[in-house]
């Protein structure tokens, strides 16, 4: 048994804390508001294939490795007492104009070249899958994607952590000198760069706004699938929830550590969503929120040892929820002195030292 201190209580920190505690380690977690931050305002898509892009093959492999773990991860978490709300929605990706359709063609060709399951659709066929979709040029259907209710997931993880004896501290940790433990895991999201010099210029905040909406009486219900769209080059997504709500996101831009909701972001999301799913114009707007994703230098997260008993688990960008299971497995392997899952190797922070040498 070893003592693990985790700095950061988002989905990555909570998942690692739970799994480490299950394996018999003493775990302390430091976060003033565990279960909040970017994880609380996420869309909940578990969609490595539709996030894929040429040149990011390592990201795709890591995401798929984690997606394969998700059903077992969710079942074990539910057995702890709270269901995390995993759903097999699948993803429909649509393009509104010819330029957007060209981007979908590139994505479809890339995925086909890797042998991934994806079906190209005409606009008419896309509307047969989701009758509420507006006039779109083309689409892609990815049946293997999943989705999770991010807020149910966070509540389930915190419950499981407390059940397994994880000690929570509301203290904010600003330097590693404040921590005394056999092993330390850095999972503070966009703020992780402040905790270790190797990560100082490698992790940065990327602001994103999301909206939550609810259909009013007489409105068309939300889509049955997760719907991702390109609207004149701007990506948006609509993720249905079991309670009838619809999560709409997400803007993305550099804004430092500002977490306020900008009117421009709300307008862009609503205008884009109405073109994709016209009925949303009559929905009730129940929440606006913003979060700071932890961006990395190359779209891959940093998952691995930094040295001196410190482990990085940060920089997951849009994929924190997706990659939580495989990241937690990597942490447990590190604590046991074992090799991490093969797909995690590309995410090692060692690439930062190589970059410094170059």
Image: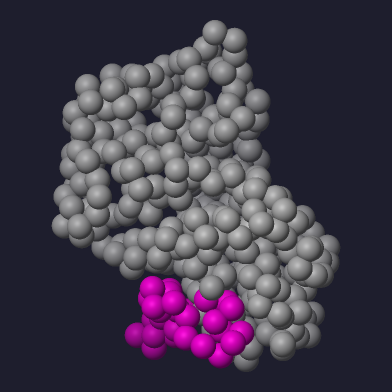
How far across and how far down the image is residue 289, in percent?
A: 63, 38
Confirm whether residue 97 shows in the render: no
The residue lying at 57 percent from left, 70 percent from top is: 328
Please check the rendered image and state whether residue 352 is part of the magenta-colored stretch, yes or no. yes
Model colouring:
one colour
The residue lying at 57 percent from left, 77 percent from top is: 331
Q: Name the residue nearer the viewer: 293 or 17.
A: 17
Q: Total label count?
A: 0
The residue lying at 63 percent from left, 88 percent from top is: 309
How far across and how far down the image is residue 84, in percent?
A: 62, 49
Confirm whether residue 283 shows in the render: yes
The residue lying at 34 percent from left, 61 percent from top is: 60
How far across and how far down the image is residue 188, in percent?
A: 65, 65
The quadrant in which residue 64 appears is bottom left
Q: Quadrant of the C terminus?
A: bottom left
Q: Name the residue nearer the viewer: 60 or 225.
A: 225
Is 230 located above or below residue 160 in the figure? above
User: Would residue 234 appear left or right of 66 to someone viewing this image?
Assistant: left
Is 222 located above or below residue 345 in the figure? above
Is 346 located above or below residue 130 in the figure? below
The quadrant in which residue 266 appears is top right
The quadrant in which residue 256 appears is bottom right
How far across and how far down the image is residue 262, in percent?
A: 59, 34
Q: Quadrant of the N terminus?
A: bottom right
| Range shown magenta | 330-358
Please check the rendered image and state whether residue 33 is part of the magenta-colored stretch, yes or no. no
């Amino acid at each position: 048994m070893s003592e693990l201190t985790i700095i950061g209580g988002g989905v990555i920190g909570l998942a690692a804390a739970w799994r480490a505690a299950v394996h018999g380690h003493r775990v302390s977690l430091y976060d003033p508001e565990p279960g909040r931050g970017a994880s609380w305002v996420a869309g909940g898509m578990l969609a490595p294939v539709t996030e894929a892009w040429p040149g990011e093959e390592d990201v795709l492999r890591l995401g798929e490795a984690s997606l394969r773990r998700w059903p077992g991860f969710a079942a074990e978490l539910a057995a702890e007492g709270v269901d995390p709300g995993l759903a097999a929605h699948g993803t429909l990706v649509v393009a509104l104009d010819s330029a957007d359709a060209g981007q979908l063609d590139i994505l479809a060709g890339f995925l086909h070249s890797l042998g991934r399951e994806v079906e190209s659709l005409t606009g008419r066929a896309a509307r047969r899958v989701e009758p509420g979709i507006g006039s779109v040029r083309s689409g892609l259907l990815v049946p293997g994607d999943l989705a999770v209710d991010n807020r149910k997931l966070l509540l389930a993880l915190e419950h499981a952590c407390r059940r397994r004896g994880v000690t929570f501290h509301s203290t904010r940790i600003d330097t590693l000198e404040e921590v005394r433990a056999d092993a330390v895991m850095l999972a503070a999201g966009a703020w992780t760069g402040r905790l270790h010099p190797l990560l100082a210029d490698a992790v940065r905040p990327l602001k994103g706004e999301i909206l939550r909406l609810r259909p009013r009486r007489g409105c068309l219900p939300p889509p049955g699938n997760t719907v991702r769209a390109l609207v004149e080059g701007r990506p948006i997504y609509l993720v249905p929830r079991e309670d009838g709500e619809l999560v709409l996101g997400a803007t993305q831009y550099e804004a430092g550590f500002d977490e306020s909701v900008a009117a421009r972001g709300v307008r862009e999301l609503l205008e884009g969503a109405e073109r994709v799913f016209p009925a949303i114009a009559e929905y009730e707007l129940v929440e606006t929120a913003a979060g700071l994703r932890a961006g990395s230098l190359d779209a891959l997260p940093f998952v691995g040892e930094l040295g001196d008993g410190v482990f990085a688990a940060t920089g997951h960008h849009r994929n924190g929820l997706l990659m939580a299971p495989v990241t937690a497995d990597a942490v447990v392997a590190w604590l046991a002195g074992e090799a991490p899952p093969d797909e995690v190797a590309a995410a090692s922070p060692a690439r930062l030292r190589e970059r410094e040498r170059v």
